[in-house]
Image: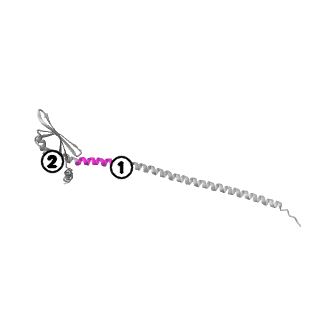
């Protein structure tokens, strides 16, 4: 029988398998490195993309904040202008009240009485003046009471004085304008101005 020695052939096969395992291990390692690097690249790209979106949102928020600040400033200016407008409207409406008040005072003032000052605080009108006698002050109060524009005459003080070597009675009284009639005058004035 012939004997064949297969040892060298087995050894060659073993070496070939070991080389194949080393090559496969190298390829797997290389493939693992490529996979890890591609995952890192994709992750870095996603992070950059998200950072870009965050920066865009931050920029838009800053723009909106400036617009909100401008809107608040415009609202404040609007409120200020509305307040000014209301003051002007109040002054325009009270302008007719002053004319009616002075006209009524001139019409209702008796001959023996003259006024030193007329002062209006909100809805109270203070009259300070001189009369030749107490009777003239009473006549003035009756005239004021009968007026359709004025109401509630209240005598605060009356005292005798000498003014320019003439005996006079200084008086101080308060009256109120009638609101309903003053409002009616204000409503009539714009209608008369339009026609």
Q: Is residue 31 left or right of residue 175?
A: right
Name the residue located 76 percent from the left edge and 59 percent from the top edge. Answer: 16
Kindly identify which residue carries mark 2.
145
The residue furthest right is 1
- Going from N to C along the chain, the mark reached first, 2 or 1, is 1
Q: Of helix, strand and loop, which one carries label 1? A: helix
Position of residue 38 relative to residue 122, above or below, is: below
Position of residue 137 relative to residue 58, above or below, is: above
Position of residue 174 relative to residue 191, above or below, is: above
**Residue closest to the eye, 161 or 23:** 161
Query: Disc 2 and disc 1: Cα gap in Å?
Result: 47 Å
Q: Nearer the viewer, mark 2 or mark 1?
A: 2
**Residue closest to the eye, 88 or 178:** 178
Q: Are marks 2 and 1 in contact (CB under 8 Å)?
A: no
Quarter of the image with the C terminus in it? bottom left
Residue 145 percent coordinates (x, y): 15, 47
Q: Quadrant of residue 30?
A: bottom right
Q: Is residue 145 left or right of residue 35?
A: left
Residue 29 percent coordinates (x, y): 68, 55
Kindly identify which residue carries mark 1.
75
Q: Which residues are magenta?
A: 74-93
Name the residue located 71 percent from the left edge and 58 percent from the top edge. Answer: 24
Q: Is residue 16 magenta?
A: no
The residue furthest bottom is 1
- Label 2 neighbour load within 10 Å: few <14, some 14-19, many 20+: some
Q: Is residue 84 magenta?
A: yes
Predominant SS along the magenta part: helix
Q: Is residue 79 left or right of residue 120?
A: right
- Label 1 neighbour load within 10 Å: few <14, some 14-19, many 20+: few
């Amino acid at each position: 029988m012939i004997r064949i020695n297969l040892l060298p052939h087995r050894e060659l096969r073993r070496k070939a398998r070991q080389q194949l395992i080393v090559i496969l291990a190298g390829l797997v390692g290389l493939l693992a490195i490529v996979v890890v690097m591609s995952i890192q690249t994709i992750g870095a790209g996603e992070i950059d993309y998200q950072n870009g979106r965050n920066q865009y949102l931050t920029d838009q928020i800053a723009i909106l904040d400036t617009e909100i600040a401008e809107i608040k400033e415009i609202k404040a200016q609007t409120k200020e202008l509305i307040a000014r407008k209301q003051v002007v409207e109040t002054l325009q409406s009270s302008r007719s009240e002053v004319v009616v008040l002075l006209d009524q005072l001139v019409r209702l003032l008796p001959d023996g009485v003259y006024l030193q000052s007329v002062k209006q605080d909100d809805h109270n009108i203070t009259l300070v003046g001189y009369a030749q006698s107490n009777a003239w002050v009473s006549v003035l109060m009756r005239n004021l009471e009968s007026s359709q524009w004025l109401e509630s005459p209240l005598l605060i003080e009356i005292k005798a004085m000498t003014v320019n070597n003439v005996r006079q009675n200084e008086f101080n009284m308060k009256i109120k304008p009638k609101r309903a009639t003053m409002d009616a005058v204000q409503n009539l004035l714009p209608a008369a101005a339009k026609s």
